[in-house]
Image (cartoon, rainbow, N blue to C red):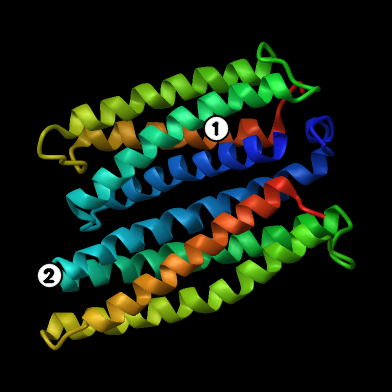
């Protein structure tokens, strides 16, 4: 059970990272088009939900962790911030999906930093 | 296994972070290149091929190098380099051939983008590159499973 939970949790994190990579390319001016952004948005939604659900499941399943451990609570807070920033990116890009708009780009880079911070937290697990 | 996951020497964290970060950027740029190449089938050949080419050249190849060097670093730290267990072997067996696939896909998309810009095709190169990228992505899903499940 643990192996499959971890595999799917990490796979979901790769979906989040793929979204960040696609959005970064678009913000930097790559002609990725609406299709790539739509795929990235789907990966963000699926990856976001799966990382949270499977992450909490792992915290319950693994003997050495508790859901109320500081680093896990910090990860949940960062996840909420990343989710909020993700919605802001979509809102700022507007109907036309203009990700080069200043506000959309700023929200995207903040989200990218938050995702990077989540990865740092998952690797170092401070206090675990 | 689940208790073991909770304890890891601090010295392993930096190479593991670089390994995972490299792998994430690698997969992300392959996904970007793959979705870009879907545009070749819809007729916007030159921009799609150019996007895929740049994604592979600027993103995937450097990310592969970071991922692979960090993998060697952490294997050395963990003392797994000399007699690697099966899950480490799976990592090496998936990463090294896929590097060749990515190099070939990069060359193909580069040639295809030039042809498409001149209006003399490029679709075939794009389609072959898309297949190579798909194979690489499937190999990486298998590698992620091996890295997390660590089969013996």
Mark 1: which secondary structure?
helix
Alpha carbons under labels 2 and 1: distance apart: 39 Å
Residue reaching furthest to the bottom = B120
Mark 2: which secondary structure?
loop
Spot occupied by residue A8 in the image (x, y as percentages of width and height): 57, 40
Task: Give the residue pinned by disc 2.
Answer: B43
Instruction: Answer with the quarter of the image where residue A29 lies.
Output: bottom left
Work out whether disc 2 and disc 1 sit on a shared chain: no
Q: Report the chain holding disc 2.
A: B
Residue A55 as seen in the image, left or right of residue A24: right
- Looking at the rendered image, the disc whose residue lies closer to the viewer, 2 or 1, is 2
Label 1 CA crowd tier, 10 Å (few <14, some 14–19, many 20+): some
Residue reaching furthest to the top = A68
Spot occupied by residue A71 in the image (x, y as percentages of width and height): 66, 21
User: Where is A75 relative to B78, above or below?
Assistant: above
Q: Residue at x 33, y 71 (%)?
A: B53
Label 2 CA crowd tier, 10 Å (few <14, some 14–19, many 20+): few
Q: Residue at x 34, y 62 (%)?
A: B34
- For the N terminus of chain B, which image quadrant? top right
Task: Give the residue pinned by disc 1.
Answer: A117
Q: Residue at x 30, y 82 (%)?
A: B125
Spot occupied by residue B71 in the image (x, y as percentages of width and height): 71, 59
């Amino acid at each position: 059970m643990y192996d499959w939970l971890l595999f799917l949790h990490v796979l979901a994190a790769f979906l989040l990272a793929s979204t960040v990579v696609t959005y970064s390319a678009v913000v930097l001016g790559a002609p990725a088009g609406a299709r790539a952004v739509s795929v990235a948005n789907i990966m963000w939604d699926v990856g976001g939900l799966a990382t949270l659900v499977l992450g909490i499941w792992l915290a319950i399943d693994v003997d050495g962790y508790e859901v109320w451990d500081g680093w896990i609570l910090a990860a949940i807070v960062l996840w909420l911030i990343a989710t909020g920033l993700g919605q802001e990116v979509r809102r700022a890009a507007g109907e036309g999906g203009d990700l080069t708009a200043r506000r959309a780009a700023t929200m995207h880079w903040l989200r990218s930093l938050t995702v990077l911070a989540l990865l740092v937290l998952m690797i170092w697990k401070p206090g675990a | 296994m689940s208790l073991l996951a909770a304890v890891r020497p601090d010295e392993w964290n930096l190479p593991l972070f670089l390994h995972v970060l490299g792998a994430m950027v690698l997969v992300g740029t392959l996904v970007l290149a793959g979705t870009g190449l879907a545009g070749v089938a819809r007729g916007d050949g030159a921009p799609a091929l150019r996007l895929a080419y740049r994604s592979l050249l600027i993103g995937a190849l450097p990310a592969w190098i970071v991922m692979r060097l960090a993998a060697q670093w952490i294997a050395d730290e963990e003392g797994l380099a000399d007699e690697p267990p099966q899950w480490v072997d799976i990592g090496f067996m998936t990463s090294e051939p896929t590097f060749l696939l990515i190099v070939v896909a990069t060359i193909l998309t580069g040639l295809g983008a030039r042809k498409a810009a001149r209006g003399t095709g490029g679709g075939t190169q794009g389609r072959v590159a898309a297949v190579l990228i798909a194979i690489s992505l499937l190999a990486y899903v298998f590698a992620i499973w091996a890295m997390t499940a660590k089969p013996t």
